[in-house]
Amino acid sequence: MRTSVFFMTTRAGSDSIQLGMRRQRFKLCKVRFVQFRQKGIPYLNTYDGQTIRYPDPLIKAKDTIKLDLESNKITEFIKFDVGNVVMVTGGRNRGRVEVIKNREKHKGSFEMIHVQDATGHEFATHMGNVFTIGKGTKPWISLHKGKGIKLSIVKEAKKRIAAQVASTT
């Protein structure tokens, strides 16, 4: 049995990749909130609609959990901190993979984060537009062919022409 996974790309929007059964052991979920139910039972809710009871007390909102698909248990989690790898999931820079450099809290407005990619390009975005995918500079998932780096239109055209020349010779 094969399933498809959709990745956000920097240029075309999204891309589908076929996965075999061996790679479907876990998935990353962003935590929406952590609360207590009746009788004081703690639970967390993720952005994909999952509710998990008795999570680790260190897990907070905006963190990412690694969910084992066979047992539906949390195996690991990533704190939403400076220095971790994130993927931008909304806005103009959607699909980019960056490292968090700084976090700004604006009272009465959106929280902003400053991120930097592997080529050194920096920009700021809303905190809700990012999803933590790894600790430090190492992502926990495999990335699409561009590795989350957005090229300018000119650089992308030069790369495409060089690939065509290399394939004809």
Image (cartoon, rainbow, N blue to C red):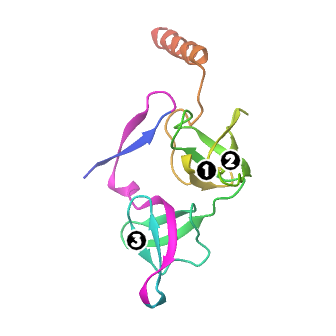
Tell me what residue is drawn at x 58 percent, y 71 percent: 59
Tell me what residue is drawn at x 68 percent, y 47 percent: 113
In space, the residues marked 1 and 3 are separated at their CA atoms by 22 Å
Q: Which label belongs to residue 127?
A: 1
Name of the residue lying farthest toward the front: 108
Foreground disc of the pair 1, 3: 1
Q: Which label belongs to residue 51?
A: 3
Report the span colored magenta. 10-38
Looking at the rendered structure, the kind of residue marked 1 is: Met
Question: Is 6 left, or right, of 147 in this rendering?
Answer: left
Name of the residue lying farthest toward the bottom: 39
Pick whichever of labels 3 and 2 is earlier in the sequence.
3
Residue 19: x, y in percent?
A: 35, 47
Number of marks present in the image shown: 3
Query: Which residue is labeled 2 in the image?
Result: 113
Residue 33 part of the magenta-drawn span: yes
Question: Is 101 left, or right, of 141 in this rendering?
Answer: right
In space, the residues marked 2 and 1 are separated at their CA atoms by 6 Å
